[in-house]
Image (cartoon, grey):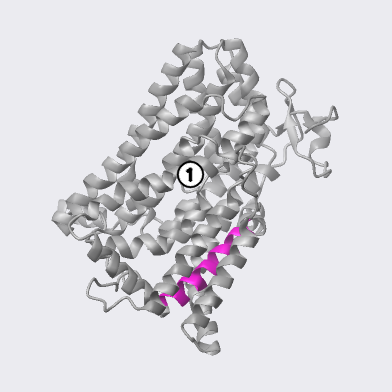
Amino acid sequence: MTTTTEAGKMKRSFKMPTVYTILFSIIALVALLTWVMPAGKYDYLVNGTDVVIPAAEVLDYDGGERLLPIPGTYQELESSPQGVIDVLMAPIKGFHKAVDVALFVLVIGGFLAVTMRTGAMDSGVAAIVRKFRGREQMMIPVLITLFALGGSTYGMAEETVAFWAVILPVMAVAGYDRMVAAGIILLGSGVGVLASTVNPFATGIASGFAGLPIGDGIVLRVVQLAILIVLASWYVMRYASKVKADKANSVLADIEFDDEFSHVSEDTGEFTTKQKWTMGIFFGAFLVMIYGVIPWEDMGITAIPTLWWWFDELSTLFLASAILIAVINRMHEGEFIKTFIEGAKDLIGVALVVAVARGIYVVMDNGVIIDTILNWAEGVVTGLSSGVFVVVTYLVHIVLSFFIPSTSGLATVSMPLMAPLADFSGIGRDLIITAYQSASGWINIFAPTAGHLVAGLALAKIPYERFLKWVMPFVVMVLVVTVVLLFAGAAMA
């Protein structure tokens, strides 16, 4: 017979599996779905043409053009169940599809290690904290707003991985824990992407498939963005004040951290000219990154040239910046190479997390069940009243977003189907776009399929289950706020 004491020990000894195990379990679950769900495809239209690719031929099509599913054309195909070998191979194939992001993470690791070796980060953070002494909480809403604007305007998500090295030591010296840094970065960028205003990768792509200008529906989205920024700032500031008052209130209080983010002190010496140049290059790299990834032309700003940078260019940017920092600090060539490799080595785990997460989509795609899930969604929302329709559309997209965490990928496959259904419910297609991006943004605030989230938490060494427990009240609040706004938007349509 188990005693109460023994039961208590068993309960305390339970430990949540790592994010790798969680992701691998999801891959296995999706593989099981390929055995019970029918395989199927829609007929697809080649973007910009009148060419229709029949469902049976879509899998063999390799023309390179974007394909758009045609509503009402779904048909079942021969099943393609995924077995044990497919599950084991999914992370490997996922790495192939995520190699650009994984390489970016490794280069960031080297860049951060070189910067940290110079001592400029310690001195710079200490100088910032001294400047904000007594007003540390003011940094939180300002930073959340900046991340939210980045998420809302150009879909800032994967790019946030690079900012953890900046925010973590600042919050540590200010007397907060790592969860405050996680809240600033993940909730800030998360609510921004959720309430995308002119984000070309979410609002832009979805608007194009819905046949609308990108500005349609922007008033509701701006209201949504403002409300969620206030909510996120309040949530993080409230927690930060508790941690500041008593470290025992931290959800990470029982974890001892020993890394480069744990040894920054406010008592660091003078911030020298060489260190100022180093940090100027450090932050300058981030500013150049932000400029390079924003598609100014798609946002209607033709006066600013668009660079169309992505991860190859960003990796090159941070590699060049690391070399420049080494030159300024007269770092020996051997020391630079050793430091850079050590930094990249520290983030190998983060790069692998991204690859494993991408393996989920690989299994779904190879199992030919993505269109089957979309067909189910099409059947769920048909025939509902306007207010209920838009809310149900939001909930359906939450399910779809779990399996297709990419905002642009979800827009590509779902919007050509969902947008025309709005016409039968008497609401504007812009509400369907808002519902889609709100759902995608909502689940990516906490889902383990969001690569930038698990990568950032891995970098900060924050257990995923701790973050999940901490963030769930906020997630529920965001869900309620979004449902109310969508229902109100449908009522006013």
- Expressed as whole percent of the image width and height from the top left, the position of residue 177 reads 26, 59
> Crowding at label 1, few (<14), some or many (≥20) Cα neighbours within 10 Å?
many
* Above or below, 453 relative to 127: above
Query: Looking at this view, is 141 or 461 the one in front?
Result: 141
Q: Residue at x 25, y 46 (%)?
A: 237
* Above or below, 434 relative to 92: above
Query: Looking at this view, is 476 or 482 the one in front?
Result: 482
Query: Is residue 259 among what the camera can see?
Result: no
Is the stretch drawn in magenta largely helix, strand or loop? helix
Q: Quadrant of residue 247?
A: bottom left
- Residue range highlighted in magenta: 98-116
Query: Looking at this view, is 188 or 478 the one in front?
Result: 188
Query: Is residue 50 among what the camera can see?
Result: yes
Side (left or right) of 308 relative to 471? right
Q: Is residue 113 magenta?
A: yes
Side (left or right) of 422 relative to 286? right
Q: How many marks?
A: 1
Q: Residue furthest left?
A: 245
What's the residue type where badge 1 is placed? Gly
- Expressed as whole percent of the image width and height from the top left, the position of residue 264 reads 29, 72
- Expressed as whole percent of the image width and height from the top left, the position of residue 374 reads 63, 29
- Expressed as whole percent of the image width and height from the top left, the position of residue 439 reads 49, 33
Q: Residue at x 21, y 61 (%)?
A: 175
Q: Quadrant of residue 354?
A: bottom right
Query: Looking at this view, is 30 or 179 the one in front?
Result: 179
Q: Residue at x 36, y 28 (%)?
A: 481
**Dot 1 corresponds to which residue?**
151
Side (left or right) of 431 relative to 222? right
Q: Residue at x 64, y 42 (%)?
A: 302
Q: Is residue 447 magenta?
A: no
Side (left or right) of 82 relative to 484? right
SS for callout 1: helix
